[in-house]
């Protein structure tokens, strides 16, 4: 049996007497889009926090490219090629949109910081700005390039969070509700962007999302969590028809 590109194996997380995750397992194929869905409080963000090493599981393992992430300190996770966005966005609010994306490059360029007295100048800076501008174009933020992050509405802050994560050139991208606050046309653009990242660039994406039309449009496979336990896994068509998923999360209106 081949080793999965990314996997959680029998992961359990407890907070006192509360089981946030119970023997949770999930395998993600390289270059795929894998959605993780479920009601609020189901344990989805806990999964991401285990991968990011913000939480240490009581048992189980998290494996990426054949290596246990639990053996790494948190600051090594980004260097391993893993990037993440958050529900609660943490931007450098006084910096511009462009500058926030440049900050995202510091995780892959040792010693690089684009501002202040020690900032690099010349060819390296021009190359970084060119790459950042390309990311802003791809995420629909070019017109806001020189706008302070604090002046952005919530939807554009979410897009900037994604652009900054992409600046690290991740191999594995964890997206926590990227469609939150986006309008319909922006969700359609996000759909195209995510598919392009996976199909054209080979980025593996794990997506936590409540906007089901986005999930069903882009996900190769879907894992469903409820009360810290996996209750279903499969394609969108399979999950949509699963009685447990309908009862716990989707409701009867999502039947085909």
Image (cartoon, grey):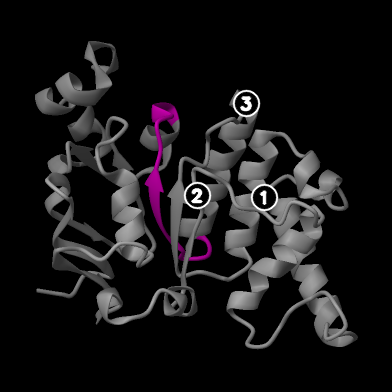
Q: Earlier in the sequence, mark 1 or mark 3?
A: 1
Q: Is residue 93 above or below residue 243?
A: below
Magenta-drawn segment = 200-213
Foreground: disc 2 or disc 3? 2
Residue 92 in the image, given as x and y percentages of width and height = 71, 57
- Residue at image mark 1: 160
Q: CA distance from mark 1 to mark 3?
A: 15 Å
Looking at the rendered structure, the secondary structure element under dot 2 is: loop
Q: Earlier in the sequence, mark 1 or mark 2?
A: 2
Extreme residue in the top direction:
253
Q: Which mark is residue 183?
A: 3
State which quarter of the image contains the N terminus: bottom left
State which quarter of the image contains the C terminus: top left
Looking at the rendered structure, the secondary structure element under dot 3 is: loop
Residue 63 shown left or right of residue 58 in the figure: right
Residue 205 in the image, given as x and y percentages of width and height = 41, 56
Foreground: disc 1 or disc 3? 1
């Amino acid at each position: 049996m081949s080793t999965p590109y990314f996997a959680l194996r029998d992961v359990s997380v407890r907070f006192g007497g509360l089981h946030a995750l119970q023997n949770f397992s999930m395998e993600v194929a390289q270059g795929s889009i894998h959605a993780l869905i479920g009601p609020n409080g189901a344990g989805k963000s806990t999964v991401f926090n285990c991968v990011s090493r913000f939480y240490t599981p009581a048992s189980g393992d998290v494996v990426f490219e054949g290596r246990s992430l639990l053996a790494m300190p948190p600051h090594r996770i980004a260097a391993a090629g893993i990037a993440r966005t958050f529900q609660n966005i943490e931007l450098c609010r006084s910096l511009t949109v462009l500058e926030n994306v440049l900050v995202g490059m510091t995780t892959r360029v040792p010693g690089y910081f684009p501002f202040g007295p020690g900032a690099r100048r010349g060819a390296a800076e021009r190359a970084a700005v060119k790459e950042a501008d390309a990311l802003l174009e791809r995420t629909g933020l070019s017109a806001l390039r020189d706008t302070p992050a604090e002046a952005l509405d919530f939807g554009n802050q979410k897009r900037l969070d994604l652009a900054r994560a992409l600046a690290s050139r991740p191999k594995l991208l964890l997206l926590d509700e990227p469609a939150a606050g986006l309008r319909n046309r922006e969700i359609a653009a996000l759909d195209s962007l995510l598919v392009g990242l996976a199909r054209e660039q080979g980025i593996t994406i794990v997506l936590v999302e409540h906007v089901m039309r986005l999930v069903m449009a882009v996900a190769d496979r879907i894992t469903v969590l409820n009360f810290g336990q996996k209750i279903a896994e499969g394609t969108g068509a399979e999950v949509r028809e699963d009685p447990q998923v309908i009862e716990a999360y989707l409701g009867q209106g999502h039947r085909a």
